[in-house]
Image: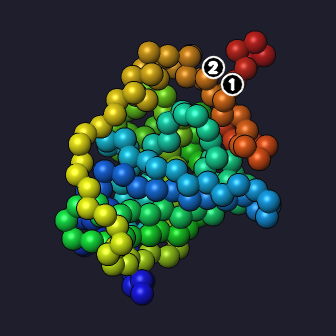
Amino acid sequence: MAKVHARVDGRLREFVERQQVFFVASAPLAGDGHVNLSPRGLPGSFGMLDEHTFAWVDTSGSGSETIAHLRENGRVAVMFCAFDGAPNIVRFHGRGRVVTIYDEEYAGLAGRFADLPGARAVIVVDIERISDACGYGVPLMEYAGERELLTSYFDRKGPVGSAEYRRRKNRTSIDGLPAFDFDPDPVRG
């Protein structure tokens, strides 16, 4: 049975901030829409802003389901699992919002995290429910290191190439919802 907490502090915050990876779940309002579950965890890209607010740098990639769902309804769940050490699972349920690279608030938020090539937004989650559970069913696994493919790819593309990539691949969700459609059209401005 999960234990519900009033805030993310002490051992919960220490646990969250030392994880290498976390998982984000979101869904559209439509009953026939696709639920999304995505891993996140580039080094230096996530953390607690305060006892009730979590954020991460969202990079360009193969899709933009989380952004689409947050724009439509804001619902999000974030989960951390202990793959080494003592077993534990921590979940945040809340409301998320997208702060794009074009928003005034972006620089202040992004400045708290690593500077990542291809960054398109900071996702901010106002946590409404905080819980932890035993995690006894999660296997023990050893951390072997980071994959540098994503950051290398967008580093080579640069800001202009990253924006072009997003215009081609991130404008809508797989269900046709508006996703990352914020990049200006270079022809129309």
Circles 2 and 1, Cβ within 8 Å, touching? The answer is: yes
* 154 versus 52 height, above or below: above
Give the foreground label among 2 and 1: 1
Rendered location of residue 61, percent (x, y): 54, 34
Name the one closer to the observer, 148 or 180: 148
Tell whether 45 sits left or right of 106.
left
Q: Amino acid at mark 1?
A: Arg
Q: Residue furthest left?
A: 85
Query: Quadrant location of the N terminus?
Result: bottom left
Query: Quadrant location of the C terminus?
Result: top right
| Marking on residue 168 | 1
Name the one closer to the observer, 173 or 143: 143
Residue at the image position 49 percent from the left and 28 percent from the top? 118
Q: Which residue is mark 2?
A: 164
Q: Residues within 10 Å of mark 2 (few under 14, many from 20)?
A: some
- Tag 2 secondary structure: helix
